[in-house]
Image (tube, rainbow, N blue to C red):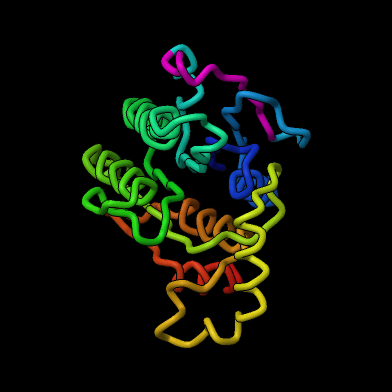
Amino acid sequence: MGQISLVIGATGLVGGQVTEELLKRPGMDEVRVLVRRPPEATHPRLRIIPVDWDELERFEEAFAGVHSVYCCLGTTIKKAGSREQFRKVDVEYVLKSAALARRHGVRQFLAVSSMGASPGVRNFYLRTKGEMEEGLAAMGFHGLHLFRPSLLLGNRPDRRFGEQAAAILMTSLDVLFRRPKLAPYRAVPSLKVARSMVKIGLTDMKGHHIYPNEVIHVLGDTAD
């Protein structure tokens, strides 16, 4: 019997690629995506569920029968409009989704976080990601998997000049960043993150696991 997976944030850079990778798997019965706006992709095993994130509880049946949830939600302060709205997306929506997943017996919960995430740091972005991780860890999933990439490389739906400039610089210095001391900071293609998440999510691995940037590079490279 195949699996049912649910992708949250499927219109984003990593979420879109996670969705594509899942749909390639012959043992996948259905891939559900919770989205505010429908993606362009179509597939006979893809089920698109339009959602109002502020009333997420009305859509909790989307979590029924799901084996793995892939949470790729994320925004920027500029796009969100304020720190409060940023936190709403990156923490509150994530934890609400996780609570519904836990209620419906989801076995594996996977989330994109960030290198350096910690609830105790001064940096607002990293502290927010740390709070998200802390909240997820308290929920008691059979398997919780947190992915902490460095700078993501890929074609984003929304252009971010600062990130584009950093990506060009870090790509040109990629050989240098392959050294052990710099490997944690090496820019990582978003496809590697997506492939890493799918490989882990298709298992029934137990426990709380954190995947640092250098591990994501390895997981994303290795064949199934």
Q: Answer above or below: position of 219 versus 13.
A: below
Could you tell me which residue is drawn at 52 percent across and 31 percent down? 80
Q: How many marks?
A: 0
Quadrant housing the C terminus: bottom right
Q: Nearer the viewer, residue 148 or 108?
A: 148
Q: Is residue 75 left or right of residue 85?
A: right
Q: Is residue 105 left or right of residue 48?
A: left
Percent position (x, y) of residue 181?
A: 40, 84
Residue 170: image quadrant is: bottom right
Q: Is residue 30 left or right of residue 61?
A: right
Question: Can residue 38 be seen by looking at this rendering?
Answer: yes
Q: Nearer the viewer, residue 64 or 129?
A: 129
Q: Please say whether residue 53 is one of the residues in the magenta stretch.
A: yes
Percent position (x, y) of residue 140?
A: 24, 40
The part of the chain drawn in magenta is 46-57
Percent position (x, y) of residue 177?
A: 52, 81
Q: Answer above or below: position of 41 versus 52.
A: below
Q: Answer above or below: position of 133 versus 44.
A: below
Quadrant housing the N terminus: top right
Question: Can residue 73 be seen by looking at this rendering?
Answer: no
Could you tell me which residue is drawn at 65 percent across and 49 percent down? 160
Could you tell me which residue is drawn at 50 percent across and 52 percent down? 202
Q: Nearer the viewer, residue 20 or 132?
A: 132
Percent position (x, y) of residue 83?
A: 40, 33
Q: Please say whether residue 89 is one of the residues in the magenta stretch.
A: no
Could you tell me which residue is drawn at 69 percent across and 47 percent down? 159
